[in-house]
Image: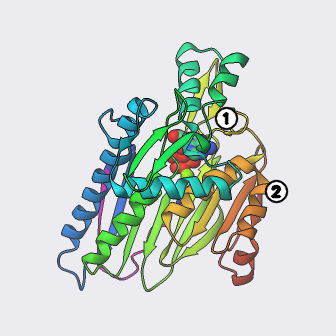
């Protein structure tokens, strides 16, 4: 959905490496002209991604998240401080987004995953009992002991809409420690830019990758997109978004095709792109306008041409140049 146009490196000598990590292709580009250890910097940044995948993946049973999900309803599980702090921030993001972003969404992910496997939509009573497990109020957090547990049985956490952004921020910190002056980290279309010069990032038409609908300029900040049609459950021939509205329990299905958010950190861009996608055009844009430091480009419609909605901060600074509409 979001892409970095070629030629970003301008006339600088850069090296670029791609690795598959956190369920996506991550591309890291670093300037190497003043920085002989650029390749080492990139490898160290990928190691950071892998370390954080080991910490935050719910698919690894022995990861701290895997353990919280398996044992947290019985007794609180001690987790690394870094994960505890991320969990506390995630709870605050739920409050700020009126529950549109919620890391306790995992029982619903499981419900829809099972529905996909069986090829049958969840039954109403299953939905009701699963929804009862989704609420940050169920989390038992002890800052003193650095433990996470649940007050009710069957609750689980999922960092799917924040972990990649957090890892991107940590990877950029690693690059800075190597005194990198130019870097682009592109994790499956979410992009962070570390540079003294701005970079133009294009936002594609979701139905036609060749068609650029808008572009935003990044400089020492990040962009992320949540969109319909990128990742989905397939049930009975229909496609259902991987982003779930925790208030209804249903996959997001509405007029928004994609929500792209620009923020100072990749963590914020990741969280708020998901939240705005859940909230839809009006409430989503209201949230962006009411939150300092966030900008957004929202695409609306069911088929091309899509309406392009741009937050007021981007309009004022003309950092976005819509094209082709
Ligand atoms: P992507 O992974 O494509 O960048 P998102 O950042 O929107 O997309 O994250 C989607 C993932 O986040 C889902 O696969 C799921 O693991 C988790 N998730 C789904 N709905 C929510 C939600 N409402 N709040 C928090 N996490 C969610
Ligand atoms: Mg997200």
- Would you say residue 16 sits in the magenta stretch? yes
Q: Nearer the viewer, residue 13 or 156?
A: 156
Can you give x and y, in whole percent of width and height, for residue 24 in the image? 40, 46
Left or right: residue 161 versus residue 175 is: right
Q: Start and end of the magenta stretch?
A: 5-19
Q: Which sits in the foreground, 287 or 180?
A: 287
Q: Pointer 2: what residue? A: 282
Question: Helix, strand or loop at disc 1?
Answer: loop
Residue 91, percent from left and from top: 57, 53
How far is disc 2 from disc 1 in space, using C-alphas?
A: 19 Å
Kindly tell me whether residue 115 is visible in this rendering. yes
Most frequent secondary structure within the magenta stretch:
loop
The answer to whether residue 110 is above or below residue 57 is: above
**Res 4 visible:** no
Q: From the top left corner, tell me how far across and down residue 104 is, in percent.
A: 55, 40
Ligand 1 lies in quarter: top right
| Residue matched to label 1 | 251
Residue drawn at x 43%, y 56% is: 143
Task: Tell me the residue at 41%/39% (across/down).
Answer: 76
Quadrant position of residue 245: top right
């Amino acid at each position: 959905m979001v892409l970095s146009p070629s030629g970003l490196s301008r006339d600088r000598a850069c090296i670029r490496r791609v690795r598959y990590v956190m369920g996506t292709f991550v591309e890291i580009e670093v300037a190497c002209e003043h920085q002989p250890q650029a390749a080492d910097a990139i490898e160290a940044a990928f190691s950071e991604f892998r370390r954080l995948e080991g910490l935050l993946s719910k698919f690894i049973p022995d990861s701290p998240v895997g353990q919280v999900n398996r044992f947290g309803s019985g007794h609180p599980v001690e987790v690394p401080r870094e994960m505890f702090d991320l969990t506390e921030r995630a709870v605050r993001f739920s409050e700020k987004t009126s529950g549109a972003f919620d890391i306790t969404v995992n029982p619903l992910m499981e419900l829809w995953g099972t529905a996909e496997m069986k090829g049958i939509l969840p039954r109403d009573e299953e939905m009701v009992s699963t929804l009862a497990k989704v609420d940050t109020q169920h989390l038992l957090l002890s800052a003193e002991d650095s433990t996470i547990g649940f007050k009710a049985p069957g609750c689980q956490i999922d960092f799917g809409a924040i972990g990649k952004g957090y890892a991107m921020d940590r990877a950029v910190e690693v690059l800075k420690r190597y005194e990198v002056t130019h870097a682009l980290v592109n994790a499956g279309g979410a992009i962070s830019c570390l540079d003294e010069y701005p970079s133009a990032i294009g936002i594609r038409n979701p139905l036609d990758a060749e068609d650029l609908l808008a572009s935003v300029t990044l400089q020492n900040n990040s962009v992320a997109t949540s969109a319909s049609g990128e990742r989905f459950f397939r049930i009975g021939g229909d496609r259902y978004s991987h982003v779930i509205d925790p208030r209804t329990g249903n996959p997001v299905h509405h007029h928004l095709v994609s929500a792209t958010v620009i923020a100072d950190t990749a963590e914020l861009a990741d969280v708020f792109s998901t939240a705005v996608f859940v909230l839809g055009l009006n409430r989503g844009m209201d949230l962006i306008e009411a939150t300092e430091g966030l900008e957004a480009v929202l695409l609306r419609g069911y088929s091309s041409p899509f309406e392009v909605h741009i937050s007021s901060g981007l309009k004022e600074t003309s950092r976005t140049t819509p094209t082709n509409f």
